[in-house]
């Protein structure tokens, strides 16, 4: 599993190390037909994507005149492959994983920024390591090619180090956390709830997190180009529904948190603890993110950096065409409607 999970029970921690089929109760991908829904949308366990459950439960899709088949994936990786295979029309996924898919031949478009990680992705180290410089020569585990691997490299570069200065141990995220707790590696790059698991090692501590590198880990609504070109009105309805959902959460936070925590299988109190590590983007922040820039807060800039990283580690064999990766017309249209 490359990314994301909010569930903190030991049972789910074990389950996450295996591949699990996508599951809305009683629903399979093959069950949905074009007459049953306007758009099939995937999402999985990450605080920035749980608002979609509020959209569904509060019937905000219907209010924006779109029939959505919202598909929950226990395994995030499966949601990525399902979108790439064209079995769903849209998915909630990271910028890095979207670029990986495009580099592999998929034709996908980012139309909305859901959030940025602001602390839920961490580099955790054993006792005795007190700085990034102390990582030199140490065994550091992470799932290769993931955003947490990217975060690790960002931290090393900040201190003038490279990947060659550490002993990189490529492990699936759950196994990486387990190896760290077992004392088999000196540090680990993981996301919540594996952060909680890793910190169970006596004397362990957080060295740095995604909050220290603003914009490095962004999450999005991504659609296939085929669906976008065929049904731009449905894409617009999804974007409109997202912002209507954020308004609904603001208007009734307790009820909304109850919906989101239930979807995640955690208590409202546990959900609130993780929520601080995720920055949900406003319409203004969306508009700004799509613009060219000179730091990671700009999506075009971040995409170039992520592509360089994936190429450097051999995860992207060919450089993807980034000129068609972003389409901000839908957030612009929503913003224009709000001004009226």
Image: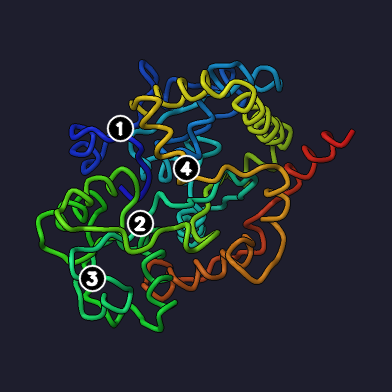
- Tell me the CA gap for discs 4 and 3: 26 Å
- Of marks 3 and 2, the one in the foreground: 3
Q: Earlier in the sequence, mark 2 or mark 4?
A: 2
Q: Residues within 10 Å of mark 1 (few under 14, many from 20)?
A: few
Which residue is the site of mark 1? 21
The disc placed on residue 122 is 2
Query: With respect to residue 105, does 57 lie above or below?
Result: above
Q: Earlier in the sequence, mark 3 or mark 2?
A: 2
Q: Earlier in the sequence, mark 1 or mark 2?
A: 1
Q: Nearer the viewer, residue 158 or 141?
A: 158
Coordinates of residue 316 in the picture (x, y in percent)? 43, 67
The disc placed on residue 276 is 4
In this view of the protein, can residue 119 be seen by the observer? yes
The disc placed on residue 112 is none
Report the number of numbered marks. 4
- Of marks 2 and 4, the one in the foreground: 4
Q: Is residue 231 left or right of residue 193?
A: right
Report the residue at 10% width, 60% height from top.
183
Do callouts 4 and 3 mark residues in contact (Cβ within 8 Å)?
A: no
- Of marks 1 and 3, the one in the foreground: 3
Q: Residues within 10 Å of mark 2 (few under 14, many from 20)?
A: many
Image quarter where the C terminus lies is top right
> Dot 3: what SS?
loop
Report the residue at 33% width, 26% height from top.
265
């Amino acid at each position: 599993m490359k990314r994301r999970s909010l569930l903190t029970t030991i049972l789910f921690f074990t389950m996450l190390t295996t591949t699990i089929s996508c599951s809305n109760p009683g629903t399979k991908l093959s069950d949905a037909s074009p007459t049953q829904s306007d758009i099939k949308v995937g999402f999985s366990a990450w605080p920035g994507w749980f608002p979609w459950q509020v959209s569904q439960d509060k019937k905000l899709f219907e209010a924006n005149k779109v029939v959505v088949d919202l598909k929950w994936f226990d395994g995030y990786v499966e949601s990525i492959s399902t979108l790439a295979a064209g079995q769903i029309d849209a998915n909630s996924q990271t910028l890095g994983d979207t670029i990986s898919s495009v580099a592999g031949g998929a034709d996908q478009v980012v139309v909305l920024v859901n959030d940025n990680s602001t602390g839920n992705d961490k580099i955790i180290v054993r006792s005795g390591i007190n700085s990034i410089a102390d990582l030199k020569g140490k065994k550091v585990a992470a799932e290769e090619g993931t955003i947490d691997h990217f975060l690790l490299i960002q931290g090393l570069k900040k201190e003038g180090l490279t990947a060659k200065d550490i002993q990189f141990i490529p492990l699936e995220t759950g196994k990486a956390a387990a190896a760290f707790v077992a004392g088999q590696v000196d540090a680990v790059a993981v996301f919540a709830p594996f952060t909680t698991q890793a910190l169970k090692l006596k004397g362990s501590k957080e060295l740095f997190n995604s909050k220290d590198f603003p914009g490095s880990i962004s999450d999005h609504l991504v659609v296939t180009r085929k669906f976008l070109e065929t049904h731009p009105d449905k894409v617009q309805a999804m974007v409109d529904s997202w912002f209507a959902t954020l308004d609904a959460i603001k208007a009734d936070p307790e009820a909304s948190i109850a919906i989101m925590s239930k979807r995640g299988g955690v208590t409202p109190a546990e959900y609130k603890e993780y929520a601080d590590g995720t920055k949900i983007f406003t319409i203004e922040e969306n508009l700004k993110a799509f613009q060219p820039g000179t730091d990671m807060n700009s999506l075009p800039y971040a995409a170039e950096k992520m592509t360089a990283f994936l190429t450097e580690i051999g995860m992207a064999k060919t450089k993807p065409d980034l000129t068609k990766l972003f389409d901000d017309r839908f957030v612009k249209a929503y913003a224009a409607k709000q001004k009226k």
